Image (cartoon, rainbow, N blue to C red):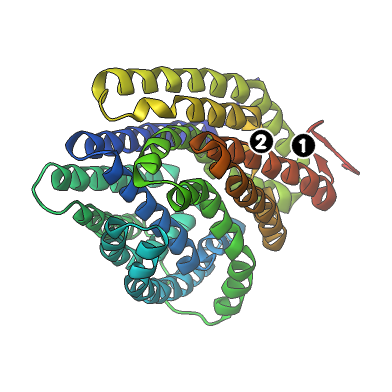
Amino acid sequence: MKIFKHKLASDIAWSMGSMVVLAACGILINLTISWFRDASALGAFNQTYAIYIITSQVAVFGLHYSVLRHAALYSSDAEEQGYLLVNAGVFSLALGVCSAITVYWAAPFFGRILDSASVQAATVNASFGLTLFPLNKVLMGYLNGLRHMKAISVLQSGRYILVLLFVAAVSASTYPFEYVTLGFFIAELATTCGVFVYLMIYGIFPTMRFDTRWTRRHILFGGKSLFSGILVDVNSRVDVLLVGFFLSDLAVGIYSFAAMLVEGVYNVLAFVRLNYNPVLVGNVRDGNWAAAQRLLSQTKKYVFTAVAILSLCVIAVFLVLTTFIVPAKGLNQGLLPLGILLVGLTLISVYIPFDNLMLVSGHPGVQTLQQMAVILTNIVLNIALIPLLGINGAAIATALSYISGIAALIFLAMKMLGWNLLTNLVENQS
């Protein structure tokens, strides 16, 4: 039996290639900052990046989720695809401009909360990138819904490479370090241009007209899924922000270096999920549970072992980097948090590709409840454990939040869809 149909296998292969580029860029960004500056600068950068990612989810208002689902639902109706894309694109651009202005003026607040002048200055510069980030999320959601995964892979890779090059140039220069976050705007601008060139070449939006019919649909679906998107990104950054709140920029730098490597492993699974999303939309729409069950069965067969091996490789990479590349920066103190986070992620790895199941099945509000369980667990445990155990406490809290999120997914899949993800059985299957 083939693991996946040819199209899905090819798309996942392209996504994995993009993931390698993203992971390499993430490592090189952190190494470059550590090499030319120090762990405190790395901590300031990662706190600013956390602010950028979280505020961008507020700005996009869940419109990218609506575009992803509806582009997949209307996969055979090019005219309707054009209407839904233009409508969401207009609103996302307007929201991006508003969010950029808001974050620009709120930068002193973030600086005071995190007790870091560097974070304040870097946030001011990062705010410009927010003008285009929501639009790019919508455009990528559109391509995802139509399963143009090769284009997404190339565009995502290009975005991260541009950020890396800009960070390296500023870090190696005599300019103030806080200028590195101007690279976000450059990368977003290049991504926007790249997507539009691709769409024009392939004629994917032949109907360039604003249709008010889609305003209510996007707002309702996006509004219900808004907090789901926010909570996903908050959960991926809340540990870094709370370490910054309780501890120093140096501690954030040490912890965020380890967390960055774990995020690389998570991104492997996230890219698989990216490919699964439009497939699951079709499976649920058509009631083709047999195909969905086969997908889960094959995932269970291979993913746990693959992630376990990958985690061991990540630990080896961490040891090489902290021992031979940047031995004097104190980053080796992140080894235990790294191990804790990897164990938590590996335990629930087979279900992460299905983590958007509520969203793609048309239950964005339920998806939000699932993510809320994760973030509340993460925040409460981080607040309780960081003062007691430092960065090790942050790792324990975050690992437990991973497990709580998957527990919520399993419960909701059974309740809402009748699909028992543990046994891979569907109730009342015809």
Residue type highlighted by circle 2: Tyr
Tell me the quarter of the image containing the C terminus: top right
Q: Quadrant of the N terminus?
A: top right
**How dense is the environment of label 2, judged by Cα within 10 Å: few (below 14), some, or many (20 and up)?**
many
**Location of residue 233 with respect to 423 vertically, above or below:** below
Q: Which residue is mark 2?
A: 351
Q: Nearer the viewer, residue 389 or 367?
A: 389
Q: Residue 222: x, y in percent?
A: 58, 68
Q: Residue at x 45, y 25 (%)?
A: 335
Secondary structure category for the residue under label 2: helix
Horizontal relation, residue 226 to residue 95: left or right: right
In the rendered image, which quarter is residue 136 located in?
A: bottom left
Above or below, comparing residue 320 to residue 25 in the picture: above
Left or right: 410 in relation to 114: right
x then y, percent, for residue 364: 67, 61
Q: How many marks?
A: 2
Residue 165 position in % (x across, y down): 19, 43
Q: Could you tell whether 48 is left or right of 335 in the image?
A: left
Q: Which residue occupies the foreground of this view, 2 or 414?
A: 414
Please name the residue that numbered disc 1 is placed on.
421
Residue drawn at x 68%, y 26% as measured from the top left: 300
Q: Secondary structure at mark 1?
A: loop
Residue 198, by quadrant, is: bottom left
Q: What's the amino acid at mark 1? A: Leu
